[in-house]
Amino acid sequence: MTERKDRAEMTDRTQIRQIEGGVTAAKGFEAASAAAEIKYKGRTDMALIYSEAPCTAAGTFTSNIVKAAPVKWDMEAVRAGRDVHAVVVNSGIANACTGEEGIRCCRETAKAAAQALSIPEDSVLVGSTGVIGMQIPVDRICRGVQLLAAAKGSTLEHGTAAAQAIMTTDTVKKEIAVTFTLGGKQVTLGGMSKGSGMIHPNMCTMLGYLTTDAAISKEMLQKALSTDICDTYNMISVDGDTSTNDTVLLLANGLAGNPKITEENEDYHTFLRALNYVNTYLARRMAGDGEGATALLTAKVIHASSKEQAVMISKSIITSSLTKAMIFGHDANFGRVFCAMGYSGAEFDPDKVDLTFESAAGSIRIAENGRGLDFDEEEAKKILSEEEVIILADIKMGEAEATAWGCDLTYDYVKINADYRS
């Protein structure tokens, strides 16, 4: 998907301004990348996020029973409420299904980072993404930590390099930063993520790292993150597979100097809106960059009787293999959408549903009150050929709505995953 570069956007409702940058945009944060040859050769494969001040940390993690070693490591640290100074991430090998050796790798990574950065060992979080079942060469990752520590910096370029280093089958880096005001102080929130395959909404569905200089308590930080993933990362899917490594970490070092958020006041809700802005952007970028994808598929359900109903139906549409294949073929076979809605588990009257396809090329009503309409096939094909296609389902039962994001299903998805380990 085409990235919007250096875009500044002000919204009247939230006063959130998108700026250039990612994880280094907020005060006190640095980042780095390094080529440690964990699995890849000829590219960077390790990233560092570092804060000069200790951070309050919040996290959400995979609901998959099979959890990678870094997930277990980070879950323990976040739940214990420990201060965090650094996150070390590698790509290429997931450090999942690796037993005690995998935990030892996390421990050695943290020890190396503590020594290189002069920070407490228990203030280091770790992350991994890549092939499941392989052991990470501990000597290489420890050497990589040394390279990261020597290369870290606070420029936007350092943040971008980190975002590129965590990519696996991703085709584009994913980063964003915004500024907003809390208690009269300018606050910045930045983030980066990776995700292209093995993505399905079930807590969170990728690796995501968010940094902010806001002053906020751990309780409110965790509440904000846990609340927001329901409308962002939990609403995307590429292939229906929930990863063993899903992790989203949100670090806040308080250097903006705003009055500390300790309750659900106006500043908390402003922070929550900014977090939603960042997470929605990253979620859409991941969905649109699904393995082999040529189009971002957006499903919006309106006039539902409840948010739960709208969520169930919209998710079912974007996870339907037949609907995804329909988008790839630019074929307005709307019966596939109705089918996906029907097995979603949500109760609705199919004889009242209106269905519309939209994109930058226009809008066309395909069905009304559950019945197909006569429409121009060529116009429909043109609309379905854009980089983002929107399926709008009006179920005429209430005022609730929900939006989910996915991608089309192409031949290349099978090719990529048929030889992923090679």
Image (cartoon, rainbow, N blue to C red):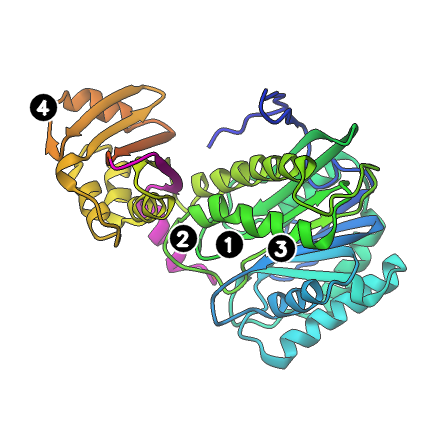
Left or right for 250, reference 373? right
- Read off the residue under disc 1: 204
**Hey, what amino acid is under mark 3?**
Lys
Dot 1, crowdedness within 10 Å: few (<14), some or many (≥20)?
Answer: many
Q: Secondary structure at mark 4?
A: loop
Q: Residue at x 47, y 67 (%)?
A: 64
Vertical placement of residue 96 versus 190, above or below: below
Mark 1 and mark 2: Cα distance apart in space = 22 Å
Left or right for 211, reference 257? left
Between 93 and 307, the one nearer to me in the picture: 307
Q: Residue at x 71, y 40 (%)?
A: 159
Q: Secondary structure at mark 2?
A: helix
Instruction: First in sequence, mark 3 or 2: give its number.
Output: 3
Q: What is the x, y in percent for residue 233?
A: 49, 47
**Label of residue 5 in the image:** none
Q: What is the x, y in percent for residue 225?
A: 60, 49
Dot 2, crowdedness within 10 Å: few (<14), some or many (≥20)?
Answer: some
Instruction: First in sequence, mark 4 or 1: give its number.
Output: 1
408 in magenta? yes
- Read off the residue under disc 2: 416
- Read off the residue under disc 4: 374
Between 25 and 272, the one nearer to me in the picture: 272
Query: Mark 3 or 2, which is nearer the eye?
Result: 2
Mark 3 and mark 1: Cα distance apart in space = 29 Å
Q: Secondary structure at mark 3?
A: loop
